[in-house]
Image (cartoon, helix red, strand yellow):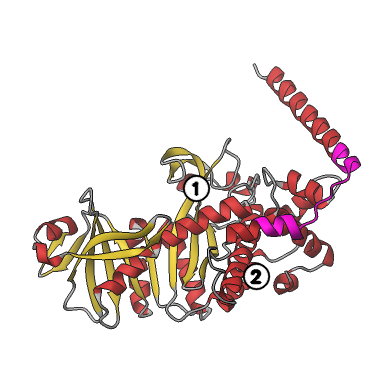
């Protein structure tokens, strides 16, 4: 918290932000302004709500401090920047950016809020370092709706790859040590994102669809090129360790775009059981062996694991806020809390191997220990009873207003 102290104009919001982060790290059944305020010993959630909505502090500055915090502990010249989006299911239509749209969280079209995240992945660990909220066209075309949700005037529609390009530019301009970028088909299909990375001579392994066309003598679909490969072209490699051991696939590659500078390949992954294919468009200024590309392709799963851990351990998706600023502030502090756990685990593991018969300390185990041994919530019975009375009073007021509003409808 000392790293971000300079982003607050007054000591009061800085202390409240510390209590907020401790609440995110606490073992609470649900994490919102109510439960975090009760955990912190406040008499009402107003202070936490004020911290997110109106207090004067620089959330983007905290994001930059978070990035430096992560790279200071996990930094590696061969690190991988991983970009991905995730959706949070929502009710109503007033929350910034919410609409019926596809989200991988549910695996279908749902009323949701979608954001794009950037993760830093190195041999020491991985953590989220940047975020952008996706604003659909229906929102960008409605200034009144944007104003009601606190979205800054002039905020235009941007695709998810455009948001990724924005985050990657910020990160690389800041001199973050990294050698590769990876992401799923949404980002691999965007020529502007690939051009940005090639202009910086930044290597990438980006997934593409089976119908993606590449130039290998003639311009063909990726799946058509895969069908022409001989059996000897396939090699077995691990894409990295999963919860059940190494993830082995069959891999093949072929050079593409021979008339352009640098080295480019179409990388093909084949499931050893189902024979399902996946395709990646790759670039590197220098020649690299096939196992190096396979290793980077396997890093893409790191952001999915990191997002899930940030949701489960630090309440990344539990924000019950409606406005643009509140979302960015909640998510930034949640990313900071999750990064703390990752760095604590990396620090413990760097001290030496785990004792015989035990695995190293993980961020999940550190979260349990930190919540049980370090965090000291307000436990007095009078405090709990006051909060019970406050909740019932607030819920009564909300129900009464709802019934009155219903009665006024024709």
As helix, strand or loop, the secondary structure at mark 1 comes to strand
Q: Which residue is mark 2?
A: 61
The residue carrying pointer 2 sits among few (fewer than 14), some (14 to 19) or many (20 or more) residues within 10 Å by Cα, namely some
| Residue at x-position 66% and y-position 53% | 326
Q: Is residue 237 left or right of residue 169?
A: left
Q: Nearer the viewer, residue 404 or 340?
A: 340
Tell me how many marks there are: 2
How far is the residue under mark 1 from the one under mark 2?
Answer: 24 Å
The residue carrying pointer 1 sits among few (fewer than 14), some (14 to 19) or many (20 or more) residues within 10 Å by Cα, namely many
How far across and how far down the image is residue 392, in percent? 81, 30
Outermost residue toward the front in this view? 356
| Residue at x-position 44% and y-position 69% | 81
In the rendered view, tell whether residue 385 sits above or below residue 201: above
Q: Is residue 146 left or right of residue 275?
A: right
| Residue at x-position 66% and y-position 64% | 59
Q: Which mark is residue 87?
A: 1
* Viewer can see residue 189: no
* Viewer can see residue 46: yes
Q: Is residue 246 left or right of residue 103?
A: left
How far across and how far down the image is residue 397, in percent? 80, 29
Instruction: Quarter of the image for the N terminus: give it.
Output: bottom right
Q: Nearer the viewer, residue 352 or 89?
A: 352
Q: Nearer the viewer, residue 60 or 24?
A: 24
Q: Quadrant location of residue 7? A: bottom right
- Magenta highlight: main SS: helix
Q: Quadrant location of residue 226? A: bottom left
């Amino acid at each position: 918290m000392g790293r971000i102290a300079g982003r607050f104009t007054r000591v009061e919001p800085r202390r409240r932000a510390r209590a907020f982060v401790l609440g995110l790290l606490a073992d609470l059944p649900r994490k919102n302004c109510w439960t975090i305020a009760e955990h912190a010993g406040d008499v009402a959630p107003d202070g936490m709500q004020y911290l997110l909505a109106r207090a004067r502090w620089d959330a983007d500055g905290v994001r930059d401090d978070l990035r430096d915090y992560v790279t200071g502990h996990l930094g590696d010249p061969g690190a991988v920047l991983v970009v991905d989006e995730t959706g949070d299911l929502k009710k109503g239509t007033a929350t910034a950016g919410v609409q019926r749209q596809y989200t991988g969280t549910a695996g279908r079209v749902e009323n949701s809020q979608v954001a794009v995240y950037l993760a830093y992945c190195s041999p020491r660990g991985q953590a989220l370092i940047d975020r952008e909220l996706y604003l659909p066209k229906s929102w960008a075309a409605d200034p009144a709706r944007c104003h009601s949700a606190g979205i800054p005037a002039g905020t235009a529609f941007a695709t998810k790859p455009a948001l990724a390009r924005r985050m990657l530019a910020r990160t690389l301009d800041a001199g973050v040590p990294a050698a590769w970028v990876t992401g799923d088909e949404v980002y691999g299909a965007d020529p502007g994102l690939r051009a940005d990375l090639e202009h910086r001579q930044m290597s990438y392994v980006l997934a593409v669809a089976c119908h993606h066309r590449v130039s290998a003598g003639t311009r063909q679909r990726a799946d058509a090129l895969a069908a022409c490969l001989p059996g000897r072209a396939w090699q077995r490699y691990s894409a990295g360790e999963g919860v059940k051991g190494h993830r082995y696939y069959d891999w093949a590659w072929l050079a593409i775009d021979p008339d352009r500078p640098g080295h480019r390949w179409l990388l093909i992954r084949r499931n050893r059981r189902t024979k399902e294919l996946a395709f990646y468009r790759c670039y590197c200024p220098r020649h690299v062996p096939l196992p190096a590309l396979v290793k980077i392709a396997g890093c893409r799963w790191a952001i999915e694991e990191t997002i899930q851990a940030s949701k489960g351990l630090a309440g990344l998706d539990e924000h019950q806020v409606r406005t643009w600023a509140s979302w960015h502030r909640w998510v930034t502090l949640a990313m900071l809390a999750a990064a703390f756990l990752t760095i604590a685990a990396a620090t413990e593991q760097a001290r030496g191997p785990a004792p015989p018969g035990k695995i190293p300390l993980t961020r999940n185990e550190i979260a349990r220990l930190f919540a049980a041994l370090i965090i000291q919530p307000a436990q007095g019975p009078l405090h709990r009873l006051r909060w019970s009375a406050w909740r019932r009073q607030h819920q009564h007021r909300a129900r009464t207003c709802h019934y009155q509003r219903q009665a006024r409808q024709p």
